[in-house]
Amino acid sequence: MSRTRVLSLIVILLLPAANLLAQARVQKPNDFTLELGGRCLLYSLSYQRMLGKMAALEVGASMIGGATEGTGTSVIFLSGGGRIYLMRNNISPCIAGGAVYVTGVVDTGPFEATGSGVYFYLTPGFEYRMSGGFVFRGGVNFLIKGSSFFVWPGIALGIAF
């Protein structure tokens, strides 16, 4: 066989497979994940909704601590932002960014205080989304507040539906 025929055969066989790779985000545009580390420091539960094939909006929440009989300490994180995918494949680099609202309450012994604030995050990373619904994300979070920033890794596991 000539090179042209072999190349044509390869393109005919692989072109439909490449289109199938990009279908997982379109067919299952919602996902729910548990992120370890990441923008909320220890963990976060997040929901993401695709807006087309290459962009998504995401919200998340996390709580650390608790109270017993009127004493304790708790910190609540509420996050929101967007994600841009750089490729249409199921395995794709992506960039996420947004804001995290943090509120904390201390009510232990003589200490009583409440405080809140906002910091921003920028996360370059990647996502692997299987056609069956499994989602894996990894990234490096740049947590930014004022002129300072903190670098913190994160991995997320979840399900798309």
Image: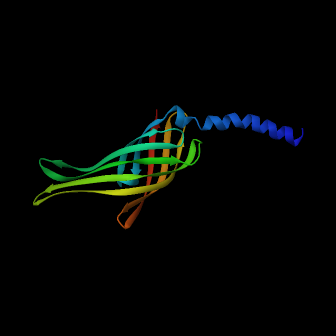
The picture places residue 40, in percent across and down from the top left corner, at: 35, 53
Q: Residue at x 53, y 31 (%)?
A: 27
Q: Is residue 11 left or right of residue 106?
A: right
Q: How many marks?
A: 0
Q: Residue at x 56, y 47 (%)?
A: 92
Residue that lies at the very extreme toward the bottom in this rendered image:
147
Q: Residue at x 38, y 43 (%)?
A: 46
Q: In the picture shown, does residue 28 fall above or below 74?
A: above
Q: Is residue 78 left or right of residue 114?
A: right
Q: What sort of colour scheme is used for the picture?
A: rainbow
Q: Is residue 106 left or right of residue 5?
A: left
The picture places residue 28, in percent across and down from the top left corner, at: 50, 33
The picture places residue 15, in percent across and down from the top left corner, at: 71, 37
Tell me the quadrant of the picture where the N terminus can be found. Answer: top right
Q: Is residue 101 left or right of residue 150?
A: left
Residue that lies at the very extreme toward the left in this rendered image:
110
Residue that lies at the very extreme toward the right in this rendered image:
1
Q: Residue at x 74, y 34 (%)?
A: 13
The picture places residue 76, in percent across and down from the top left corner, at: 27, 50
